[in-house]
Image (tube, rainbow, N blue to C red):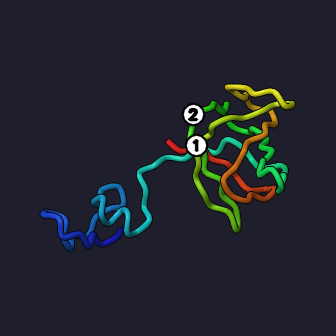
Amino acid sequence: MVKCVSSVAGSHGIVRRRKSICALCRSISGVSSVSEERVGVVAHYYTKISVAVVDVTGDSLSVGETLRFRGSTTDFTQPLESMEVEHQKVPKAEKGASVGIKVADRVRPGDLVYRVS
């Protein structure tokens, strides 16, 4: 249980369950309605070209999805604009594939990759 601190009518000062927190309090408390599904793990990172090798361990990955990279010192979200398998661009990668993804920030081996929806 968390206390809603919003001044929005009907929710000010009322104790509510996390599912029913108003949008303002959700943003303040860090509770998010965004769902994340684990889809892979970073196997290697090429520093000079900012490319992460991701082993797909969950469902397939498709160009156009939004990914979140999260580890002990890593936490950022970016759209998946392109990916490569053996230096060939592919629109989709299935479970078990290793793909190269251009990333916006540094990642480390072992960082988890989530699909954000």
Helix, strand or loop under label 1 = strand
Q: Is residue 21 above or below residue 98?
A: below
- Residue 2 place in picture, x, y as percent: 34, 70
Which of 74/39 is in front? 74
- Residue 37 place in picture, x, y as percent: 59, 43
According to the picture, the residue beneath numbered tag 1 turns out to be: 79
Q: Residue at x 17, y 65 (%)?
A: 8
- Residue 33 place in picture, x, y as percent: 41, 51
Q: Is residue 47 above or below residue 94?
A: below
Residue 64's disc is: 2
C-beta proximity under 8 Å, tags 1 and 2:
yes
Crowd tier of the residue under label 2, counting other residues whose Cα lies within 10 Å: few below 14, some 14–19, many 20 or above: few
Q: Is residue 50 left or right of residue 23?
A: right
Q: Residue at x 59, y 48 (%)?
A: 78
Residue 98's disc is: none
Quarter location, residue 21: bottom left
Q: Residue at x 62, y 47 (%)?
A: 114
Which of 64/59 is in front? 64
